[in-house]
Amino acid sequence: MSEAIANQPVTEDYMPRTIIAGVIGNMVEWYDWTVYGLLAGVFSHAIFPAQNPTSSVISALLTFAVGFLMRPVGSIVLSPLADRYGRRQILSLTILLMGFGSLLIAVVPPYASIGIASPLIVLVARLLQGFSTGAEFQSSTVYLVEHAPAERRAFVGSSQLASIGFAVLVATGVATLTTTFVPQPALETWAWRIPFLFGALLSLYGMWMRLRLPETPFFVAIEQRQDKAHRPIFEALREYPASTLYVFCVQIGTVMFYLWTVFLPTYANLVGKLPLSQGLLGGTISLAAFTVAVPVMAALSDRVGRKPLLIGSAVGFLVLARPLFFLLGNGDFASFLLADIVGCLLLAMVDGVMPALFCELFPTRVRTSGIGIPYQVCSAIFSGTAPLVAAWFIHRGEPLAVTWYVMAIGLLTGIVFCFMPETRGRSLG
């Protein structure tokens, strides 16, 4: 009976509801996460005052990066719970924590009012959001893929990454409207708080959606067999070391994700003097292209496999990183838009494959922990530091030095992808 449950297809009328409920929380998580990076240049002076504007931005981005350090902690604490007690139990908790962190940022008084307590409150909020995000990706990814028909696993799973693109798109759009239509000094004094308050309200709706989720058939099957792992993290690392390494290497590409989807408008503003509002507009258009491209790339991988798209993305960044960043120094909107769209399309080649690939690398009993630990450890090292590294190179007067960083990652991941086994068609059970 348990095998039948594990292998039964999800009905077509049920699948859309499952996808919507699965991605809504992830979308809210990434909206809150991204809007901080996008508006750092706006509120940094009010919360992190400094004589040099670039120094204020670096301080804000440093707090952004510190939030990533809590990702492994959240993963270590929460991922095993998803493997032992079910995927849906964790989903409501993560979105609630993220929304509360966003609310703290929205209402924090400025440095001029409460002094050092102001940046400390923001730091606590970022740590709380990092903790919740530490379990969000793998829990919602596993939930979606374990519900998906085998022949459309990547396509269904890609809704997870498409929701990230949509969330970043919404965050970019809100930031664009705020910076375009709210004049100074209102923008720097209070209007920057509106996007964070909006994120807190969205989290309440996302939590309501997730409380209505059913459990996945694969987890129900191992419950009935009494085959749940007692120490999921230890068992995943011990029994699947190669899969752990593959997840880590795929996730290193998050450096490019955060450079293109979060920091690129700030980079073009600081280096090419492109107005921030134009950079955010270009980011909105590029993210729309990314969101559309992700499911297209995923559907392609359901036909040709995961490896061709992974290798293609790595080679693309290796070859194009330097000319794309060179375009950003021109200071015109057309050059920025071209560089942003090309990078986002290369990102879509990886992100369309990622959810299905990760789930196919581990069995059900350790799947959430097996994905979560290397994914979040890698994020703590590379994701939050990516904008900070780029800002540091700008501060030193060597903005194009960041291209060597991107090219090195493209070379490393490309080599790993060539030796990684193809997972398309593997049984999740």
Image: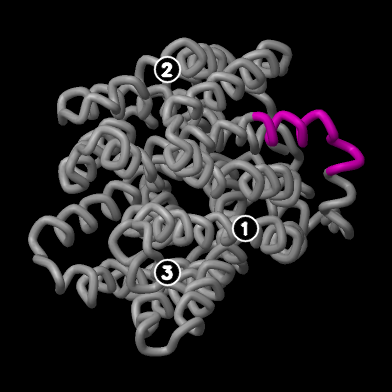
* Mark toward the start of the polypeptide (2 vs 1): 1
Residue 428: image x %, image y %?
68, 36
Determine which residue is flagged by label 2.
322
Cα separation, mark 2 vs mark 1, equals: 32 Å
- Image quarter (top left, top right, bottom left or bottom right) of the C terminus: top right
The reply to whether dot 3 and dot 1 touch (C-beta < 8 Å) is: no
Q: Residues within 10 Å of mark 2 (few under 14, many from 20)?
A: some
Q: Which amino acid does label 1 sit on?
A: Gly
- Residue 24 appearing in the image: no
Q: Is residue 245 above or below residue 322?
A: below
Determine whether label 2 and label 3 are within 8 Å by CB.
no
Provide residue 62's location: percent of width, then percent of height.
53, 57
Residue at which label 3 appears: 48
Q: Position of residue 357 (x, y in %)?
A: 61, 30
- Which stretch is magenta? 237-249
Marks 2/1 in contact by CB < 8 Å: the verdict is no
Residue 134 image label: 1
